[in-house]
Image: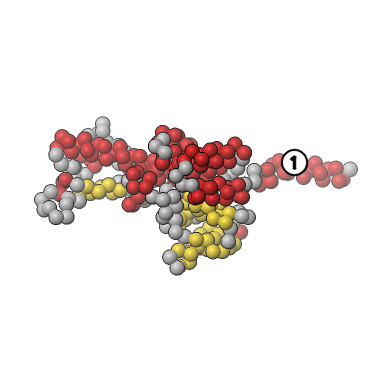
């Protein structure tokens, strides 16, 4: 009788503890998906299918946002912006969690780039009427002016630059960037980047971080940096450390490594 009650108590406890019932991360399947994506970066149809196969086989997998982000990027590169935006918009309202937070960073980055395109259009409309760009964004008509801030809540970095070799034409050229995205603020520029191009850090060791959460020692340009799960060092964000894989991202791409 005592053993029976202990069994019942264990089953009840298991149903109450999310850590015991949460879906396991299919790390090896994600690593295989990543390898196929890297091997065929321009075969958008093949990678989109592979991402959808991953989602279909592992619908509750905690690493699903990574596969979804890869799929969205291939939609971008294939010219299907609407499909990409719909997938990324869903990540904006995802519940807290390191992988979801990483997906949210990517979504905010890409949607900020789309916002910048709209703002550039408003600047061009102003130029057609004034034959000059405004000194500040506040000079744009209110009805045509997009948000004064990017998706990170930061004011746009807008300034007149003029031409280096022509004096007196300062209002004929401008620079417009997100403070967070910097030189990858332009949508076309970001889409031309090879996938993961700005993620140069390489994991070299998994360590025990604060509160017994894992951390990873990265080598970046010959220097070492230790980053905990759910934390960032510059643009590098550590989203996941598992038995087989380490997953990082910036505001543009994911990157999946075998665990060192």
Q: Single out the residue that lies furthest toward the top.
A: 143
Secondary structure of the residue carrying tag 1 is helix
Residue 78 as seen in the image, left or right of residue 49: left
Q: Is residue 106 above or below residue 224?
A: above
Which x, y percent locates residue 208?
59, 62
The one nearer the camera, 65 or 255, is 255
Image position, residue 249 (x, y; %): 47, 51
> Where's residue 94, x and y in %?
51, 40
Q: Is residue 83 left or right of residue 205?
A: left
Give the quarter of the figure containing the N terminus.
top right
Considering only vertical position in the picture, is 66 above or below 144? below
Residue at horizontal 59 percent and vertical 36 percent from the top: 56
Report x, y in % for residue 127: 18, 38
Nearest the eye: 214 or 57: 57
Residue 231 is at least partly visible in this image: yes
Q: Residue at x 85, y 42 (%)?
A: 4
> Can the viewer see residue 85 in this picture?
no
Q: Residue drawn at (53%, 38%), measured in percent from left and top?
A: 49
Q: Quadrant of residue 112?
A: top left
> Circle 1 is placed at which residue position?
12
Q: Residues within 10 Å of mark 1 (few under 14, many from 20)?
A: few
Image quarter hosting the C terminus: bottom right
Q: Nearer the viewer, residue 57 or 12?
A: 57
Query: Furthest residue to the right?
Result: 1
- Residue extending farthest to the left is 168
Q: Quadrant of residue 172?
A: top left
Q: Residue at x 55, y 52 (%)?
A: 240
């Amino acid at each position: 009788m005592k053993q029976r009650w202990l069994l019942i108590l264990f089953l009840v406890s298991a149903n109450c503890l999310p850590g015991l019932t949460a879906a396991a991360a299919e790390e090896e399947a994600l690593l295989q998906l990543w390898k196929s994506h890297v091997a065929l970066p321009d075969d958008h149809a093949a990678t989109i299918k592979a991402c959808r196969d991953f989602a279909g086989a592992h619908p509750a997998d905690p690493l699903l946002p990574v596969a979804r982000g890869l799929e969205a990027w291939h939609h971008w590169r294939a010219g299907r912006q609407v499909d990409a935006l719909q997938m990324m918009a869903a990540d904006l309202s995802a519940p807290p969690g390191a992988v979801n937070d990483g997906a949210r960073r990517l979504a905010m980055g890409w949607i900020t780039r789309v916002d910048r395109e709209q703002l550039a259009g408003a600047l061009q409309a102003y130029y057609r009427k004034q034959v000059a760009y405004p000194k500040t964004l506040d000079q744009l008509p209110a009805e045509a002016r997009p948000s004064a801030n990017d998706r990170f809540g930061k004011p746009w970095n807008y300034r007149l630059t003029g031409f280096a070799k022509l004096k007196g034409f300062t209002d004929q050229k401008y620079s417009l960037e997100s403070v967070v995205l910097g030189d990858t603020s332009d949508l076309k520029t970001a889409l031309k980047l090879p996938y993961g191009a700005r993620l140069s850090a390489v994991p070299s060791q998994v360590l025990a971080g604060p509160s017994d959460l894992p951390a990873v020692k990265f080598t970046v340009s010959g220097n070492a940096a230790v980053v905990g799960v759910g934390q960032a060092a510059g643009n590098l964000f550590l989203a996941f450390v598992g038995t087989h894989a380490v997953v990082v991202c910036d505001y543009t791409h994911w990157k999946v490594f075998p665990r060192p």
